[in-house]
Amino acid sequence: MFATLTGLGLSTAAGLNAYIPLLVVGVLANFTDRVKLPDGYAWLSNWGVLAVLAVLLLAEVVLDKIPAVDSVNDMIQTAVRPASGGVVFSATSAAAELDNSTWLTENPWLSWVLGILVALAVHALKATARPVVNVGTGGVGAPVMSTVEDAGSLGVSLVAIFIPLLVIVLLIGLALLAWWVIRKVRRRRRGRSPG
């Protein structure tokens, strides 16, 4: 169960920022015993790969703080964040340990699908909320929201690895946030529609 929560938490973090959970997993695999990468994922702890991820993270951090550019970045990240979610979910041995199921172990694609779906749902929430924040704050909210999302991605990644039980609380909080954002967007659209 803890491996599943770790995979779900890391996929959630990937939906906010694709590169932070990948870097966290890769660095921790190099320096601690908390993350053991399964066969086929050793590349994730390679220092060259981590350097490339760090450069991509730096670009993401800068671009995501600029209003309008952040929306373009979100369009590009629609493919990257779910892919990252699939990688981190399956790379953290969640696939092998998911409910100790032989079927799931023999079908590792399921961990990819779960990771992709979770990251995609979080990314969709982020991409929906960001334009509302940008318009509502005249663009001033973009860097603030981006910083909160980056910090959230790092926090969720660390919680997922070190205290996976808290992932349940985080997912409930995220579901409540999604419900609130969807209501806000619907209200705003109704307010703009004629009649």
Image: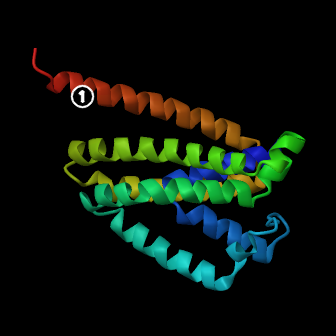
Say what secondary structure mark 1 lies in: helix
Q: Position of residue 167 (x, y in %)?
A: 69, 43
Tell which residue pokes out farthest to the left in this image. 194
Q: Nearer the viewer, residue 110 or 21?
A: 110
Q: Residue at x 78, y 51 (%)?
A: 94
In the image, residue 185 sits, relative to residue 94, either above or below, namely: above
- Give the class, few, some or many, for how many residues have Cα within 10 Å of label 1's Cα (few <14, many ≥20): few
Location of residue 166 (image quadrant): top right
**Front residue of this view, candidates 7 and 100:** 100
Can you name the residue that lies furthest to the top here? 195
The residue at which mark 1 appears reads as 188
Q: Nearer the viewer, residue 70 or 82?
A: 82
| One can see residue 12 in this view | yes
**Residue located 54% across and 37% down the image:** 174
Image coords of residue 14 (percent x, y): 56, 55
Pick the front one: 147 or 174: 174
Whether 52 is drawn above or below 8: the answer is below
How many numbered marks does the figure carry?
Answer: 1
The quadrant in which residue 186 appears is top left
- What's the residue at 66%, 84% (across, down)? 47
Horizontal and vertical percent position of residue 93: 80, 56
Left/right of residue 174 with respect to residue 70 in the rendered view: right
114 horizontally vs 141: left or right: right
Which quadrant is the C terminus positioned in?
top left
Residue 152 in view of the camera? no
Residue 76: which quarter of the image?
bottom left
Which residue type carries mark 1? Arg
- 187 vs 124, left or right, is left
Tell me residue 164's x, y (percent). Answer: 75, 47
